Structure formats: C-alpha cells, structure tokens
Amino acid sequence: MTLTDEDILEILKLDLQVSSPALDLYLLVLIASARAYIAQEGITLTDTVQDAMLVEMYAAYLYRRRREENVQMPRMLRWALNNRLFGQKGAADG
C-alpha cells in the first residue's frame, strides 16, 4: 500500500484534530518539509506505509512546534527515525 501526500494529509488532520480545509496548503508544506528534514538525517524514504507514517509524525511535530513553546521532539518520533536510519545503514553495510 502506497500513501500519497493527500493521504498523509488526511491522517495528519485526524492526528491534529483539524477538520477545516483552510490549513490544507500549510499542512502539505509541513509534509514536504518533514520529507526534507528526514532526508537531512540521512534517511532515504521508500513508498511504504511505515515511511509515510514517519513523515506524518514528523509533520505533526513541526505543526506543534510552531504553535506551542518549548515543544520537544516526541521520543517515539526520535526512536522511529533512529531505527529507520540504523536499519538502512545496517542493510547498506550488510
């Protein structure tokens, strides 16, 4: 199953409890930003549900970080990023 950015947007809106389409463009930009930040960490994303959910979690973090003060990256997200990176590096070193 492959999730498009529009699919990720719908999941992100549920996660953030946003029902209005007024923020759709902003949230799509956050999804694109999440992909870029994940790539900066050295992770190559694939078309899997797991990677789509990693993008969604990162986009949700970016949204919350801009709306609230002193928001730390959720431990679950950091754990998922590290596992994805280490798994990718382990497969490449093989």
Image (cartoon, rainbow, N blue to C red):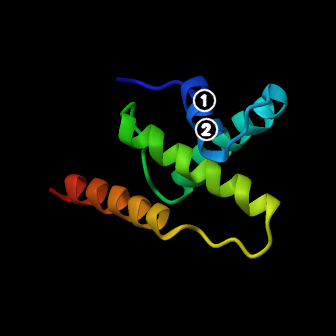
Could you tell whether 38 is left or right of 90 in the image?
A: right
Q: In the rendered image of this protein, does residue 39 appear above or below residue 45? A: below
Q: Position of residue 48 (x, y in %)?
A: 36, 33
Q: Position of residue 7 (x, y in %)?
A: 55, 25
Q: Position of residue 78 (x, y in %)?
A: 47, 66
| Residue in the picture at 47% in, 48% down | 54
Q: In the rendered image of this protein, does residue 70 appear above or below residue 12? A: below
- Give SS at disc 1: helix
Q: Which amino acid is tagged 1?
A: Glu
State the CA–CA distance, disc 1 to disc 2: 6 Å
Which sits in the foreground, 87 or 92? Answer: 87
Q: In the rendered image of this protein, does residue 21 appear above or below residue 17? A: above
Could you tell whether 80 is left or right of 24 in the image?
A: left
Q: Extreme bottom residue here?
A: 70
Per the image, the residue denoted by label 2 is: 14
| Residue in the picture at 54% in, 50% down | 57
How many numbered markers are drawn? 2
- For the residues bearing labels 1 and 2, Cβ distance under 8 angstroms: yes
Which sits in the foreground, 33 or 71? Answer: 71
The N terminus - image quarter: top left
Say which quarter of the image contains residue 18: top right
Q: Position of residue 13 (x, y in %)?
A: 65, 37
Mark 2, Cα crowd under 10 Å, few <14 / some 14-19 / many 20+, is few
Per the image, the residue denoted by label 1 is: 10
